[in-house]
Amino acid sequence: MRILVTGGAGYIGSHTLIELVARGHKLFVVDNYANSSPEVLSAVQEISGGAVRNENIDITDELRLAEVFDAFDPEAVMHFAGLKAVQESEELPLHYYDVNLGGTLKLLRCMSDYGCNSIFFSSSATVYGEPQYLPYDESHPLAPVNVYGRTKYFIEEIIRDWAKAGEERKGILLRYFNPVGAHRSGRIGENPRGIPNNLMPFISQVATGQRQCLKIFGGDYDTVDGTGVRDYLHVCDLAEGHVAALDYLFQCDGVEAFNLGTGNGVSVLEMVTEFEKVSGQTIRYEIVDRRAGDVATSFANANRASELLKWSAKRGVPAMCQDAWNWVT
């Protein structure tokens, strides 16, 4: 299948490319490298042994997108591109709406113009908001509590409306929980620019001496140790989830949503302890104020993905930490 991959040089996109190449799909990556690098795609090609066409294109540039659709004629789109920092989204809401929603609208317009009827969207568990019950399943009410989550929720709704308006249109919404880890080769992994927004790269930078101390946002939540609890998912399991979703496409009924998570909650301090075991390093940390838009606990009911996609997470927290440590060392 010919697949256009937006944001394919990013953390999740690059790991997914390896799985897609291994299955013989023809790929075209568009990425503006705002939080990635062209070198990542070179590493992907070396790991996979396959070619990946790519262009430096921002998804908000509809003219350039149209050129790619005209030349490549994709049969499906995997849409990873977008801004993704919770705290930054609260500080720059209009920018997040402009890029995430505006870019997706332009992408969908191109899909409509060129008869591309299938999209896989990189959504997020943040669409659920404060839990009314746990674990979250796909029927949980959607009430995101931060701007980032609202952009994901609005895009999901836009995709639903787009699909209803045209025959044969399909969308698969993949609601990620908390991707961590790196490829076992150590060639690609999470490499944020500036101060990391996510836990694992921050821990890694403290362990390697790049930063003096890990800031833990909130130590007074109603959790096992007062720190936030999340469903951490190995990025390679997540990549395999995308391939499973692609295999399911022909059974898909319009637009369907799937949680991709392990079903297990792990606290920040529990993750720190496990990383210390794997790395042999002491991770200095301090508890600071809670971060706006965060919830205390979040973990998945991933039964739907298991039953319909035939997918489940296989790698545990030790493998997540070990692969992340191999990546940074």
Image (tube, grey):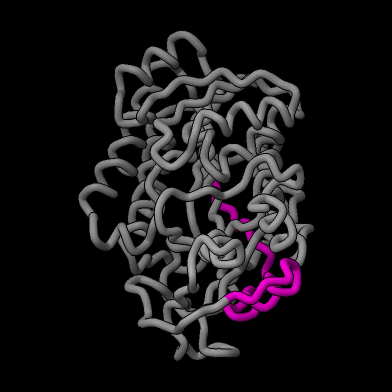
Lateral position of residue 324 relative to residue 114, left or right: right
Position above or below: 300 against 37: below
Task: From the top left corner, tell me how far across and down residue 267 is, in percent.
Answer: 59, 79
Which residue corresponds to the image point at 51% horizontal and 79% vertical from the top-left? 285
**Along the line of sight, which residue is nearer the eye, 104 or 82?**
82
Position above or below: 81 against 132: above
View extreme (left): residue: 94
Lateral position of residue 276 relative to residue 120, left or right: right
Task: From the top left corner, tell me how far across and down residue 275 is, in percent.
Answer: 68, 70
State the extent of the magenta-drawn residues as a range: 256-283
Is residue 281 on the magenta stretch?
A: yes
Task: From the top left corner, tell me how far across and down residue 249 is, in percent.
Answer: 64, 35
**Along the line of sight, which residue is nearer the eye, 53 or 211?**
211
Decide if residue 265 is in sight here: no
Task: From the top left corner, tell me how far across and down residue 33 is, in percent.
Answer: 43, 34
Decide if residue 316 is in sight here: yes
Lateral position of residue 189 relative to residue 161, left or right: right
Q: How many marks?
A: 0
Is residue 271 on the magenta stretch?
A: yes
